Image (tube, grey):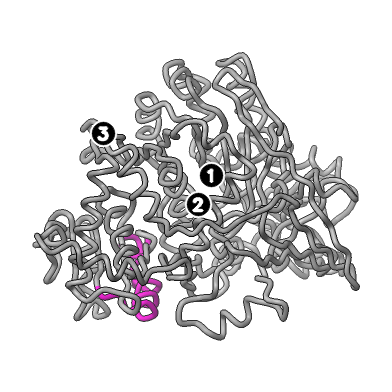
């Protein structure tokens, strides 16, 4: 057992011995020596437990309107409402072959419906709201509806989702809205799902739900094709929670207080975050802010009011948060008042931002509040590895979880990661060919991510994310480019000058960079362009070859957007799609004749 003391409390980590088995061809199998036993529970069993053991504790809360106070439901109130909605879903014909689709973002009604669908044995399919509100052709939404064939579709606001609820693919489906149902065709109010029925009808369906019942359908981004529905079982979600508990026993010390905006249509928010609240009887405050200009002020307002015990988010959000923590004394005092750790996932956290957050925490608390992370995918519910000590350092994604096997296979000079274990999906919903392609001959899921050992012959020290195997490319010289490594170095060099960046391009003689400017920077400002050139030139002086040096850059006038799919609602970039859609920008970048092309020195 390893303990880390900070002003905000004690974190107890469990040290882990990682066994490494070598195979022919350079293949390595990593396993955590800590024992793992699969819990015999469904996700909603956590709700029933706390309804009995802490019935009056607040489970979930939201602001109905921006200026309203938080209001919510206790565990007992939530459980009773979930059972009633589950009974109504069964009466309406929902079940294993008729899922429930949710188009809108996080809300109490969203979570009630999702848990009720699970209890009724109907897979819950939360779909990114961008597919219904920002898209112009509803292409991804139409594909998902055709694939899922939901019996019931929910959207919080009938007016905001009226266009999406009117497309041909909605015909014949039950439509439910929390408000303004009269503005969507044939929609009913959510109250219809609270109609008096015999709740005992739930008992038989509940008895047939087991660990391998599909609880959720979480959709991949579709960056390499159409979105695929990951069949997320109860086994996967409760196994993931148990794996984390083994390495992070401090979660059991007190019920967590969570303030979170992460979308429930993604595994980070929808399985890890809300699952943590349910597993430990915590209180979940729905953050109505987002890491976007004009929206993050809501998060700051909420953090002044609600002091979380743990805080997790994506690097983009921490970029916004760090800027506010520097200047807002009240926010800083509230945020760190009982915070035990910070956690990021979804993308790499730049080293300068990491250092800044540590410095701010030390200024406020007198000690460093640890920054932790893990690595995983939607298909693994979510974590494959997790950091099990404070001070692990930038880039360390931790050690393999107990109960799984991590296979590292040499591929293009990298170690491609594959995984087998109780938290791995059984396959994609109604996509047999994609399912078969996702697993190797031994049943290991192909993540298409690469990892590397932090220290040779010392797997206990942890692993480092090494980019996507399919993301790397060769220069015209035939030299392979480690895209993740180059991008990380560039973002470190461009701290304060770039919110994000995409490395270009295969079959060229040198590397380029498409730069996403921060909100406070003008892409047309010559001074800004000069600063970008100088920062990259300094970086190049530390690099050893053409496969590492950025020789030209272009600041994007139109930033990546949700509507185009270039950016997810977590703020991460779809690099492959950006390069495809911006191919004219890439061509201009290499022509080097336009005034906005930034040429970088060695």
Q: Position of residue 366 (x, y in %)?
A: 61, 14
Who's the residue at 16% across and 61% down the image?
Answer: 193
Q: Is residue 253 left or right of residue 25?
A: left
Label 3 secondary element: loop
Q: Nearer the viewer, mark 1 or mark 2?
A: 2
What residue did someone put label 3 on?
70
**Real-space CA distance between mark 1 and mark 2, rounded to the nearest whole angstrom:** 9 Å
Can residue 288 be seen by looking at this rendering?
no
Vertical order, 336 against 456 (above or below): above
Q: Position of residue 380 (x, y in %)?
A: 58, 62
In which quadrant of the rendered view does residue 281 lie?
top left
Q: Position of residue 394 (x, y in %)?
A: 72, 39
Chain-order first, disc 3 or disc 2: 3
Q: Read off the magenta span.
A: 130-151
Check contact, mark 1 vs mark 2: CB within 8 A.
yes
In which quadrant of the rendered view does residue 188 lie?
bottom left
What residue did someone put label 2 on?
268
What residue did someone put label 1 on?
314
Q: Is residue 2 left or right of residue 327?
A: right
| Residue 145 among those drawn in magenta | yes
**Residue sitting at the far bottom:** 433
Q: Position of residue 343 (x, y in %)?
A: 57, 39
Q: Is residue 253 left or right of residue 296?
A: right
Chain-order first, disc 1 or disc 2: 2
In which quadrant of the rendered view does residue 258 lie?
top left
**Real-space CA distance between mark 3 and mark 1, rounded to the nearest whole angstrom:** 24 Å
**Real-space CA distance between mark 3 and mark 2, rounded to the nearest whole angstrom:** 23 Å
Check contact, mark 3 vs mark 1: CB within 8 A.
no
């Amino acid at each position: 057992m390893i303990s880390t003391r900070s002003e905000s409390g004690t974190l107890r980590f469990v040290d882990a011995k990682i066994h490494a088995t070598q195979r022919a061809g350079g293949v390595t199998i990593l396993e955590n020596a800590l024992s793992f036993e699969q819990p015999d529970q469904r996700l909603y069993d956590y709700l029933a437990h706390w309804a009995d053991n802490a019935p009056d504790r607040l489970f979930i809360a939201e602001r109905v309107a921006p200026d309203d106070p938080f209001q919510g439901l206790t565990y007992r109130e939530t459980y009773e409402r979930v059972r009633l909605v589950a009974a109504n879903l069964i009466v309406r014909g929902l079940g294993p072959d008729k899922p429930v689709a949710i188009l809108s973002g996080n809300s109490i009604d969203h979570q009630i419906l999702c848990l009720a669908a699970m209890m009724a044995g109907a897979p819950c399919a939360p779909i990114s709201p961008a597919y219904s509100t920002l898209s112009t052709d509803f292409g991804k939404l139409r594909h998902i509806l055709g694939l899922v064939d939901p019996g019931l579709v929910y959207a919080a606001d009938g007016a905001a989702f009226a266009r999406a609820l009117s497309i041909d693919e909605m015909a014949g489906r039950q439509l439910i809205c929390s408000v303004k149902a009269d503005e969507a065709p044939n929609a009913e109010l959510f109250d219809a799902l609270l109609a008096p029925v015999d709740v005992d009808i739930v008992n038989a369906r509940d008895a047939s739900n087991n660990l391998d019942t599909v609880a959720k359908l979480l959709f991949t981004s579709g960056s390499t094709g159409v979105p695929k529905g990951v069949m997320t079982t109860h086994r996967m979600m409760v196994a993931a929670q148990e794996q984390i508990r083994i390495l992070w026993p401090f979660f059991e010390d007190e019920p967590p207080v969570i303030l979170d905006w992460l979308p429930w249509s993604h595994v980070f928010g929808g399985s890890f975050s809300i699952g943590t609240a349910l597993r430990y009887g915590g209180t979940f405050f729905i953050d109505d802010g987002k890491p976007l200009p004009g929206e993050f002020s809501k998060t700051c307002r909420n953090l002044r009011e609600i002091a979380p015990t743990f805080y997790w988010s994506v690097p983009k959000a921490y970029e916004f948060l760090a800027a506010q923590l520097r200047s807002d004394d009240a926010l800083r005092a509230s945020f760190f008042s009982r915070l035990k750790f910070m956690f990021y996932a979804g993308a790499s956290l730049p080293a300068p931002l990491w250092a800044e957050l540590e410095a701010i925490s030390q200024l406020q608390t007198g000690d460093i509040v640890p920054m932790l992370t893990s690595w995983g995918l939607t298909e693994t519910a979510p974590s494959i590895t997790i950091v099990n000590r404070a001070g692990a350092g930038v880039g360390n994604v931790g050690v393999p979880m107990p109960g799984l096997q991590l296979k590292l296979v040499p591929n293009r000079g990298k170690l491609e990661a594959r995984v087998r274990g109780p938290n791995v999906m059984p396959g994609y919903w109604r996509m047999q060919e994609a399912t078969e392609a996702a697993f190797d001959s031994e049943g290991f899921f192909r993540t298409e991510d690469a990892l590397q050992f932090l220290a040779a012959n010392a797997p206990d020290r942890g692993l480092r994310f090494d980019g996507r195997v399919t993301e790397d490319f060769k220069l015209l010289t035939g030299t392979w480019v480690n895209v993740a490594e180059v991008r990380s170095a560039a973002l470190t060099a461009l701290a304060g000058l770039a919110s994000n960046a995409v490395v270009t391009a295969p079959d060229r003689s040198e590397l380029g960079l498409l730069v996403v400017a921060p909100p406070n920077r003008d892409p047309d400002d010559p001074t800004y362009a000069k600063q970008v050139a100088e920062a990259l030139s300094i970086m190049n002086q530390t690099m050893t070859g053409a496969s590492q040096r950025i020789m030209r850059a272009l600041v994007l006038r139109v930033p990546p957007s949700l509507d185009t799919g270039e950016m997810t609602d977590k703020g991460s970039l779809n690099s492959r799609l950006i390069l495809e859609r911006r191919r004219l920008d890439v061509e201009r970048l290499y022509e080097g004749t336009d005034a906005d092309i930034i040429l970088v020195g060695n």
